[in-house]
Image (cartoon, helix red, strand yellow):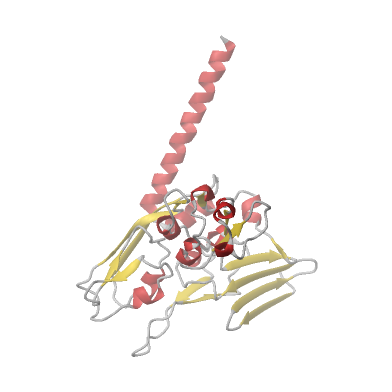
Amino acid sequence: MPLKTVKRDTADTLTLEWILHVKNYKLTLDKNLCKGCQICSLACPKEAISVKKHEKVQGEKAKKAKVDIDLAKCNFCGICDVTCPYGALKLTLNGDHDLSVLSKESYPELVRDIKVDTRQCPKECTECEHACPIGLITATKVGFDGKPVSNFDSLTPSQKQRVQINLSIQKERCPTCRVCEFKCEPGVIKVRKFMEGKIGIDQTKCPEGCTDCLDVCPITGALYLSDDGKKVNVNELFCDYCGACKVVCPVEDALKLKRTKIIHTPVHSGTWNKALERLTSPEDAVKELKAKGSQKLRQTVGKRFVFEEVIR
């Protein structure tokens, strides 16, 4: 048991601490990075995290939901840190970022499969910086000497030809929405979503003039207004299925969201199976378990076949 527990709630951060004899666990929620989605609350094995929407003020846009963590329930396992699509939660042990659930392979890591080929970048373009809806990309023009180029327009045509574009992407915070991929030149960035699913809006159930889901959606273009400006539509191409919209929707079943698959590193853990069931559904969790079982069987058969070939 900890010698002391601390909970601090400020405008920018929510911090929980366990202070022991030689260990100090600290869990920090960066409210500026948090999008008020459902993921951390669903993944938490102790049900320590709650997500509550704000009361709507007439005439104002909806606000993202508030995330709170119950210090009495939290055991500082770090699962919320691993699972947060936006990197808003961070667990440290004695000041170091420590995720034992990953090192012990009791919980998987989300696979943010992002490939960049800057050879396809136009020399004058930095569109990806503006395309990323949460500002995770930095594009830097670099000369043949490796130094940043700040005066590109003043260069000669031959000098411009030797300029390269360096792209820096904060992958640990990327929700893999794919907006950058489609805003950039073809082939520059390729992104595979780590969450797959389905989302739909029953516009017959939406209150007239309601745009609450659009107000809080962190991904530009995933939700958008119809041409007449009266109804919200969905573009699943960019949706990351975080559920921020679902939390604030004022009408039950007006917005339906279902996660069907999560791309992650290999893991053998009942903790992950339970989290997967909450994040997707019991049916989808069973599908993954069956797929893993079939894969393991194929590997076993393959090894046996190779062994038999060797002894012959």
Which quadrant is home to the N terminus? Answer: bottom right
Say left or right for 98 vs 31. Answer: right
Q: Left or right of 284: which side holds 2?
A: right
| Farthest residue, direction bottom | 58
Q: Is residue 166 above or below residue 244?
A: above
Query: Residue 194: x and y, percent?
Result: 46, 53
Which residue sits at x=47%, y=64%? 132
In the image, residue 203 lies at what x, y percent?
22, 71
- Residue in front for this viewpoint, 303 or 174: 174
Q: Residue at x 49, y 53 (%)?
A: 121
Residue 304, compared with residue 173, is above or below; it is: above
Question: Residue 75, can we see it?
Answer: no
The image position of residue 57, as x and y in percent, is 37, 89
Instruction: Identify the residue at horizontal 36%, vertical 56% (top origin).
Output: 197
The image quarter in which residue 198 lies: bottom left
Is any part of residue 296 visible from this angle?
A: yes
- Most extreme residue toward the left, as rendered? 204
Image quarter for residue 146?
A: bottom right
| 276 is higher (above) or lower (below) than 63 | above
Residues 147 and 4: in front is: 147
Question: In which quadrant will I find the C terminus?
Answer: top right
Q: Please state the total of marks drawn on the protein image.
A: 0
Percent coordinates x, y for residue 109 in the rendering: 56, 52
Q: In this rendering, would 234 be left or right of 143?
A: left
Measuring 68% from the left and 70% from the top, which residue is drawn there? Answer: 26
